[in-house]
Amino acid sequence: MKVGDPAAGDPAAAVSVLEGESEKFAVPFTEGVMVFRRWSCPEPGRETILLVHGGSGSWSHWYRNIEYLRKRFDVFAVDLPGLGDTSALAAGYCAEDAASAVSHGLESMGELSMSALSMSARGAFHLVAFSWGCVVASQLARSHSLKSLMLIGPAAVGDVLRRDLIKPLIRRTKDMTEAEVFAANKENLARLMIYNREEIDDLAVYLQTINTNRSRFNSAQFATSSLVLDGVKAIATPLKVMYGDHDAAAGGLAGIESRRELFQAARPDTVFEIIPDAGHWLQYEQSEVFNKKCKQWVEQHA
């Protein structure tokens, strides 16, 4: 647990407090409602960031980042289709359906509230995405003129997964006790999401538990597609890609270096960075490092 982290006492209460400080928008799309949250910067006229979470996640993938970023930027976070509080897509969905739904949601945001108009204005915001969210973000970037695009731990760069290096995740069953579910989620975080087991605190396990319990979208089926590369090839938006050096989903350093080559071939101007001592969920595990780098990136492209 980070020093001074209010979640040290009660993760559920801490997450509830942060969520309660946001302005919540439930905007319509074809399958139901899409939920956005906004944490307004106290200083008007600041840059706007939209945070896009990863697979089996929600806005809370950014728990350790929002408080820092909101002091400097106007921060929005979306729950993607079939995840968090957002309605699920109809059966037979494809990855592009999720991106289309978010695009429609952004348009509805502008219609819903004057305070959210900047979200649909051309060139008005920065997009920061994690894991599965990188697929959605790279597709959104093709239809929205962004100030910048930051991708954290992206897959969908072709069939380059190193599945032999990823330990199988523990399947939870209905007959498990609460303690057994907690232990399974903690171990799964170690196998896929977080490199340093000491960073797998009660908050991380709580977030993993509530997010996976509400997951109604299978993002893993799109992991070996080339959707992210296809998306960034088609745009000129300033692009930064970050991986943790122990990202299990990317196959460790060897897999990450192969991804570096793919991104630089697709976009020679890609800013590619590897964060030391971090796994897949690097913005949680190395939150202080990530927060500063995100701030610098956004300010550079303000």
Image: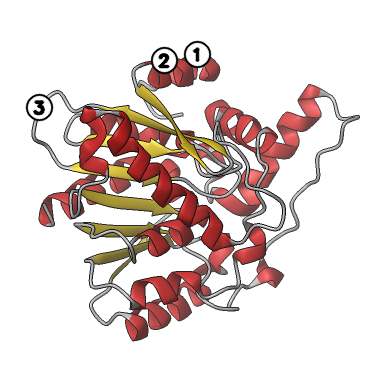
Res 75 seen here: yes
Residue 98 vs residue 105: left or right?
right
Depth check: give the residue in front, 115 or 158. 115
For image coordinates 63% across by 29% down, the residue present is 210
N-terminal-most mark, 1 or 3: 1
Depth check: give the residue in front, 294 or 231. 231
Residue type at tag 1: Ala
Residue type at tag 2: Val
Cβ atoms under marks 3 and 2 closer than 8 Å: no
Residue, disc 2: 17
Q: Give me the C-alpha separation between circle 2 and circle 1.
A: 6 Å
Residue 273 lies, with reference to residue 229, above or below; the image says above
Q: Secondary structure at mark 2?
A: helix
Cβ atoms under marks 2 and 1 closer than 8 Å: yes
For image coordinates 68% across by 69% down, the residue present is 163
Q: Which mark is residue 13?
A: 1
Q: Secondary structure at mark 1?
A: helix
Q: Give me the C-alpha separation between circle 1 and circle 3.
A: 27 Å
Q: Which quadrant of the view contains residue 250?
A: bottom right
Q: Which mark is residue 43?
A: 3
Q: Give me the C-alpha separation between circle 3 and circle 2.
A: 21 Å
Residue furthest to the bottom: 265
Cβ atoms under marks 1 and 3 closer than 8 Å: no
Res 153 seen here: no
Instruction: Mark 3: give few (<14), some (14-19) or many (20+) Cα within 10 Å.
Output: few
Residue 53 vs residue 48: left or right?
right
The image shows residue 140 at horizontal and vertical percentages of 38, 59
Depth check: give the residue in front, 32 or 19. 32
The image shows residue 192 at horizontal and vertical percentages of 61, 53
Instruction: Mark 1: give few (<14), some (14-19) or many (20+) Cα within 10 Å.
Output: few
Residue type at tag 3: Glu
Q: Secondary structure at mark 3?
A: loop
